[in-house]
Image: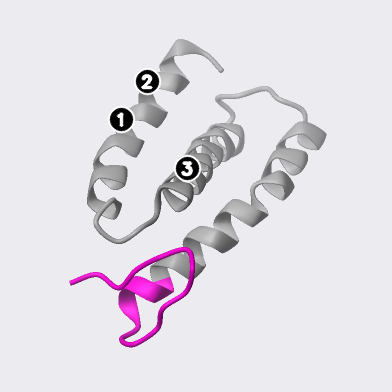
């Protein structure tokens, strides 16, 4: 990743991770980092800013599915009353 991409990713991650820290376990925060990085990389590919090959982009997205699933499940814990799992805790 270029320094520009790293700076953009960290700029997006910082406020989102701070906000999510109140209801996500640390492991889920790590998965959120992955999802945000992949989103930036994919956006750059779609916009033509990144010349990565389609196979790399597809593999990256596929590798991030587990992270997306875990973040999604933890988010549901935060938004659906009385739902508790091992990866998140209800937000107040």
Residue 7 is labelled as 2
Q: Does 87 lie within the magenta span? A: yes
Task: Quickly name the residue at label 3.
Answer: 30
Q: Position of residue 10 (x, y in %)?
A: 36, 28
Judge by depth and name the residue closer to the eye, 78 or 58: 78
Residue 11 is labelled as 1
Quadrant occupied by the N terminus: top right
Q: CA distance from mark 3 to mark 1?
A: 15 Å
Label 3 residue SS: helix
| 92 on left or right of 46 | left
71 lies above or below 42: below
| 47 on left or right of 23 | right
Please say if the residues under marks 3 and 1 sit with CB atoms less than 8 Å apart. no
Q: Residue at x 33, y 37 (%)?
A: 12
Q: Position of residue 38 (x, y in %)?
A: 56, 39
The magenta stretch spans which residues? Answer: 76-92
Q: Residue at x 34, y 87 (%)?
A: 82
| 8 on left or right of 35 | left
Q: Residue furthest left?
A: 92
Q: Does 44 lie within the magenta span? A: no
Please say if the residues under marks 2 and 1 sit with CB atoms less than 8 Å apart. yes
């Amino acid at each position: 990743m270029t320094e520009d991409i790293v700076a953009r990713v960290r700029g997006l991650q910082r406020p989102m991770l701070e906000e999510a820290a109140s209801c996500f376990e640390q492991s889920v925060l790590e998965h959120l980092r992955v999802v945000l990085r992949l989103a930036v990389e994919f956006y750059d590919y779609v916009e033509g800013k990144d010349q990565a090959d389609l196979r790399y982009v597809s593999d990256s997205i596929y590798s991030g599915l587990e992270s997306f699933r875990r973040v999604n499940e933890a988010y549901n814990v935060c938004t659906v009353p009385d739902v508790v799992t091992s990866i998140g805790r209800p937000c107040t």
